[in-house]
Amino acid sequence: EMLGISTTALKRHCRFHGIKRWPHRKLTSLIHLKQAVADDAAMPAQEKEEMSKCIASDLDAIMRDPNHPMDTDLQELRQAKYKQQYLSRVKLGHPP
């Protein structure tokens, strides 16, 4: 609405310019992962720094090319962090 065009028209223009999928979820996931890495007290400082650099690099690559695939190491870390969050919610008795 802010752009003055419909969602369908925006998607059509994006696809015309080579953007196959809108990267919002991927970007949000990486931002949350970066915060989770920073908050992880069990992770060594050097590993935190390396992962933060890798996440920042992936964020930049996605901003330059929305079709850029997420790094496989980051995908595995993201899955592990989500699983860890899920298990902590289950232990506390909160629904998923």
Image (cartoon, rainbow, N blue to C red):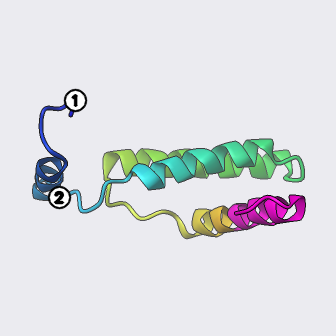
Relative to residue 93, is residue 13 depicted above or below? above
Residue at x 69% of width, y 62% of height = 82
Residue 18 is tagged as 2
Q: Is residue 51 left or right of residue 94?
A: left
Residue 2 is tagged as 1
**Any part of residue 49 in sight:** no
Q: Residue 23: where, in percent of width, then height?
A: 37, 53
Residue interval drawn in magenta: 80-96
Foreground pick, 47 / 69: 69
* Amino acid type shown at disc 2: Gly
Foreground pick, 6 / 79: 6
**Any part of residue 65 in sight:** yes
Q: Is residue 93 magenta?
A: yes
Q: Nearer the viewer, mark 2 or mark 1?
A: 1
Q: Is residue 26 magenta?
A: no
Q: Earlier in the sequence, mark 2 or mark 1?
A: 1
Q: Is residue 20 left or right of residue 5?
A: right
Residue at x 82% of width, y 48% of height = 40
Q: Main secondary structure of the magenta part?
A: helix
Q: Residue 1: where, in percent of width, then height?
A: 20, 34
* Amino acid type shown at disc 1: Met
Foreground pick, 90 / 47: 90
Q: Residue 60: where, in percent of width, then height?
A: 43, 44
Q: Quarter of the image holding residue 63?
A: top left
Mark 2 is surrounded, within 10 Å at the Cα level, by few (under 14), some (14 to 19) or many (20 or more) other residues, namely few
Q: Residue reaching furthest top?
A: 2
Mark 1 is surrounded, within 10 Å at the Cα level, by few (under 14), some (14 to 19) or many (20 or more) other residues, namely few
Q: Is residue 69 left or right of residue 44?
A: left
